[in-house]
């Protein structure tokens, strides 16, 4: 219950908890953990947060939320994107309909943003970097057929939005507040 007139009267209580498969979100004691080509300066993985923005959709007979966050896929600060689709039928409990971790090669992927469109296709955008490539922006996705079957597989191949041409040396922050958007008209 939120009381906007008097916030002191607001109350919050957890009504449900979802148990997700285990993951490693520990990238060490500092905020420098995503490598980039050409420099010792590393980026912050921001692994302790759900990336923006979890997307809620009400389809009439059911509701969905898609969301993602960064995980260490092999305990070497190799970042991947863990994503989930949550679903609630009628007014029942939320369930994890599908989930997986996207990390198809040795490059780190982080700062993810995920959206579900009206054609039941999922898009996942993210930053990518490693000791052998400059920071870049890419995306992949899930086709309507894979979505319908709830495979947890992002079967739309990774594509490049923008390749990096140099490294960033001034700060460990990269891509903050980036997000995919779905056109509300079509």
Image (cartoon, helix red, strand yellow):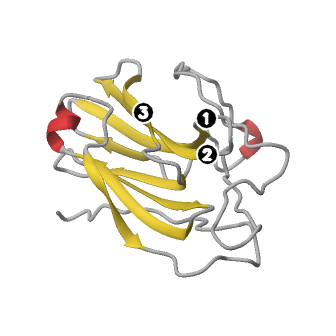
Residue placed under numbered mark 2 in the picture? 78
Compared to residue 164, the image places residue 99 above or below, namely above
Taking 15 as reference, is 181 left or right? left
The numbered mark, 2 or 3, whose residue comes first in the sequence reads: 2
Q: Quadrant of residue 63?
A: top left
Query: CA–CA distance between discs 1 and 2?
Result: 6 Å
Residue placed under numbered mark 3 in the picture? 100
Residue extending farthest to the bottom is 165
Between disc 1 and disc 3, the foreground one is 1
- What secondary structure is found at the residue carrying circle 3? strand
Between disc 2 and disc 3, the foreground one is 2
Residue placed under numbered mark 1 in the picture? 74
Q: Residue at x 20, y 29 (%)?
A: 61
The reply to whether dot 1 and dot 2 touch (C-beta < 8 Å) is yes
The reply to whether dot 1 and dot 3 touch (C-beta < 8 Å) is no
Examine the rendering and report whether any part of residue 122 can be seen: no
Examine the rendering and report whether any part of residue 114 can be seen: yes
The residue nearer to you, when weighing 13 against 24, is 24
Q: Residue at x 16, y 49 (%)?
A: 119
Classify mark 2: residues with Cα within 10 Å, few (<14), some (14-19) or many (20+): many
Classify mark 1: residues with Cα within 10 Å, few (<14), some (14-19) or many (20+): few
Query: CA–CA distance between discs 2 and 3?
Result: 16 Å
Quadrant of the drawing holding the N terminus? top right
Q: Residue at x 19, y 28 (%)?
A: 149
Q: Residue at x 76, y 78 (%)?
A: 170
Quadrant of the drawing holding the C terminus? bottom left
């Amino acid at each position: 219950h939120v009381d906007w007139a008097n916030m002191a009267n607001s109350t919050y209580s957890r009504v449900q908890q979802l148990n997700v498969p285990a993951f490693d979100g520990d990238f060490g004691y500092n905020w420098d953990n995503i490598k980039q080509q050409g420099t010792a300066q590393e980026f912050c993985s921001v692994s302790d947060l759900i990336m923006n923005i979890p997307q809620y959709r009400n389809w009439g007979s059911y509701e969905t939320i898609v969301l993602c966050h960064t995980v260490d896929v092999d305990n070497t600060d190799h970042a991947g994107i863990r994503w989930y689709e949550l679903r609630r039928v009628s007014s029942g409990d939320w369930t994890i309909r599908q989930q997986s971790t996207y990390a198809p090669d040795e490059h780190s992927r982080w700062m993810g943003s995920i959206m579900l469109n009206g054609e039941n296709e999922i898009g996942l955008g993210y930053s990518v970097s490693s000791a052998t490539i400059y920071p870049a922006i890419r995306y992949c996705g899930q086709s309507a057929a894979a979505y319908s079957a709830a495979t947890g597989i992002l079967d739309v191949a990774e594509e490049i939005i923008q390749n990096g041409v140099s490294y960033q040396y001034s700060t460990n922050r990269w891509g903050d507040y980036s997000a995919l958007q779905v056109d509300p008209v079509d």
